[in-house]
Image: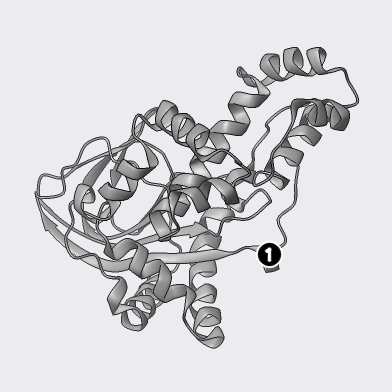
């Protein structure tokens, strides 16, 4: 398993705040390129995940991975803290790819957790969501503004916020399990190479050399282990990174393509549309609406 040194974790804060609902937290098929953490303080609601439905209850925290389609259901009073975060785009696996986080964890020290979230909310009041509708705040132009302001903070401010974020995330890490991508050491090396060079133009022949096998055998072996071809996997990861860049920056689409190793931005646009059912330009327009 690839190890993630804590000093290399590049956690960035998008949103944090406290929300109070009264049967008005009912949203379907929500998905975003960032991680969501909920800390319930009172009331109940339902979180519908693909494999299971969770009852959100006081004294527990909940973790929703990036790009995970999910839904909310609320029929009464419901209070929670929320935090949205992501790891900055760079050439290596991030902690959310290496570890499988539990969806639900019990908070042992509620007073301490209250203090952490209260601190984050008081320090970053500008990161409070304007409204609870995910179709609004996931597509609000303020999202990239939040990301820009966070990057522009003084180092000491980032260190304090990062400390609080890590303490919250540690509650999930305590119960996290390393992802077992494959038992084949050759394929482990190939996956690490892909993630460590995701912004490069990765060639299948290059991956075959990493695995010390022939190119045709690498393709067969990869598909047997992961159910997809090496190129399809690489493109999927590149498009996911592109979505995050489009969501959190104002980089032109051509620059986003270039940063992810595409010399032909028209090919990148076609690839993005095939996977996301929307062009990068349309995606950008949506998040800026």
Q: Name the one closer to the observer, 96 or 234.
A: 234
State whether residue 235 is above or below residue 114. above
State whether residue 11 is above or below residue 26. below
Q: Position of residue 63 (x, y in %)?
A: 42, 49
Residue 227 shown left or right of residue 282 in the figure: right
Q: Label 1 belongs to which residue?
A: 8
Quadrant, the C terminus: bottom left
Residue 130 shown left or right of residue 75 in the figure: right
Residue at 63 percent across and 55 percent down: it is: 90
Residue at 48 percent across and 57 percent down: it is: 86
Here the colouring is one colour
Residue at 74 percent across and 40 percent down: it is: 192
Residue 77 shown left or right of residue 101 in the figure: left
Q: Position of residue 81 (x, y in %)?
A: 30, 64
Q: Is residue 36 visible?
A: no
State whether residue 163 is above or below residue 157. above
Q: Position of residue 95 (x, y in %)?
A: 61, 52
Q: Position of residue 67 (x, y in %)?
A: 42, 40
Quadrant, the N terminus: top right
């Amino acid at each position: 398993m690839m190890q993630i040194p804590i000093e290399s974790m590049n956690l960035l804060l998008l949103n944090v705040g406290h929300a109070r609902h009264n049967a008005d937290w009912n949203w379907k098929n929500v998905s975003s390129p960032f991680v969501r953490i909920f800390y319930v303080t009172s009331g109940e609601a339902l979180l519908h995940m693909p494999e299971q439905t969770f009852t959100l209850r006081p004294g527990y925290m909940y973790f929703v991975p990036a790009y995970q389609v999910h839904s909310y259901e609320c029929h009464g009073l419901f209070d929670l803290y929320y935090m949205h975060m992501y790891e900055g785009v760079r050439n290596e696996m991030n902690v959310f790819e290496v570890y499988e986080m539990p969806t639900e964890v019990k908070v042992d020290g509620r007073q301490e957790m209250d203090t952490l979230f209260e601190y984050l909310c008081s320090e970053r009041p500008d990161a409070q969501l304007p409204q609870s509708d995910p179709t609004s705040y996931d597509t609000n132009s303020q999202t990239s503004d939040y990301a820009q302001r966070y990057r522009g903070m003084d180092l000491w401010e980032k260190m304090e916020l990062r400390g609080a974020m890590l303490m919250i995330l540690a509650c999930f890490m305590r119960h996290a399990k390393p992802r077992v991508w494959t038992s084949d050491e050759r394929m482990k090396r190939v996956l690490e190479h892909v993630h460590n060079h995701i912004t490069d133009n990765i060639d299948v022949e290059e991956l075959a050399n990493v695995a010390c096998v022939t190119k045709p055998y690498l393709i067969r072996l990869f598909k047997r282990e992961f159910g997809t071809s090496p190129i399809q996997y690489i493109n999927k990861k590149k498009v996911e990174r592109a979505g995050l860049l489009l969501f959190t920056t104002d980089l032109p689409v051509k620059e986003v393509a270039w940063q992810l190793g595409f010399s032909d931005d028209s090919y990148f646009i076609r690839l993005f549309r095939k996977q996301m059912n929307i062009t990068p330009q349309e995606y950008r327009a949506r998040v800026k609406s």
